[in-house]
Image (cartoon, grey):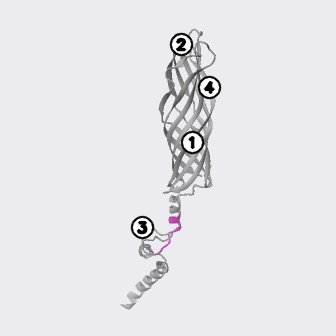
Amino acid sequence: MLKKILPLCLVSNSLFAACEPSVSSHFPSKTPANSYGNSRTDRFNCAVTGTNELSEAQLRERANLLPESLSDRWYIRLGGNAAAEGVTGTKTGGNDPQTANAIVKTKDEKTASNNIEIGFGYVWKDFAIDLEWLGLKSVAYGSTLENITPTLDFTTTVKGDSLLANVYWIAQDIYSVQLYGLMAAGFTSNKSTTVLSGGDPVALSKYSLSFGAGVGGRFNIIAKLYGDMAFRYLMLGRVKYVGRTPSGGTSMELKSTRDWLGVSFRVLWLF
């Protein structure tokens, strides 16, 4: 009988000896390093696995899930946005005496915009910078030129996207969210196609200086994948409209400011 029990005792003592040295260093409710997340103590983990340590394969699996540092890294970001964009403050310009004193009845036009954005950049500990292509929506706009005889109607479509450089000032993490403020500057392609009182369409392209500011936050989803949400206001530069009546006897030149206000929802992938 003693011979049958002796091997069991030796195995039990060996197992206990392998686990016992670390029991005193980890108290209940504190999960030891390199141990399973569900373990409450080393003793519990030993009872299940016979050891406190994870295997090399398990360590690699765990490392693939842990957040990677959002510092000193290249990244690419993809996103979509929900915004209001359009043209504001339309007024007459040019030297045509028949329309120089006209008053634009409807000076502003806004439309809902849901487009995409793509960025590539580098993040340091306290700041980051990236280059972004921002897709913009076509804005259909029309109004009447009053205070002249006869009054004239016009319609126009404004198209074009933005290329922006964003600089981020990163604040301290709050509840695992990396808050930041940002400044943006770049260029926007503002192309208008205008029809004045049934005349031929006149297209005019202009690259305008653009700038803006905003705030946002980044948070880890898993490993190299981060989420990002930013709220921004962007001035997208000047837009010009040129039109001519069917006879060509009357022409007009108008000016507007194009702007964008919205929130962007993005994901970042670290390299």
The image quadrant that residue 205 belongs to is top right
Q: Is residue 47 left or right of residue 161?
A: left
Q: Secondary structure at mark 4?
A: strand
- In three-dimensional space, the C-alpha distance between marks 3 and 4, rounded to whole angstroms, equals 63 Å
Q: Secondary structure at mark 3?
A: loop
Image position, residue 79 (x, y; %): 52, 43
Return the mark for residue 148: 2
Going from N to C along the chain, the mark reached first, 4 or 2, is 2
Disc 1: which residue: 213
Disc 4: which residue: 205
Residue sitting nearer the eye, 96 or 142: 96
- In three-dimensional space, the C-alpha distance between marks 1 and 2, rounded to whole angstroms, equals 40 Å
The stretch of residues the image draws in magenta is 50-59
Q: Quadrant of the N terminus?
A: bottom left
Q: In the rendered structure, which amino acid carries the disc numbered 3?
A: Asn
From what the image shows, is residue 81 above or below residue 150? below
Instruction: Please give the name of the residue rendered at 59% of the width and 48% of the height, measured from the top-left corner.
Output: 168
Going from N to C along the chain, the mark reached first, 3 or 1, is 3
**Nearest-to-viewer mark from 3 and 1:** 1
Give the crowd class for mark 1: few <14, some 14-19, many >=20 residues within 10 Å. some
The residue lying furthest to the left in this view is 1
Q: Give the total number of marks visible in the rendering.
A: 4
Disc 3: which residue: 38
- In three-dimensional space, the C-alpha distance between marks 4 and 2, rounded to whole angstroms, equals 27 Å
Marks 1 & 2, CB-CB < 8 Å contact: no
Instruction: Please give the name of the residue rendered at 56% of the width and 17% of the height, measured from the top-left corner.
Output: 201
Going from N to C along the chain, the mark reached first, 1 or 2, is 2
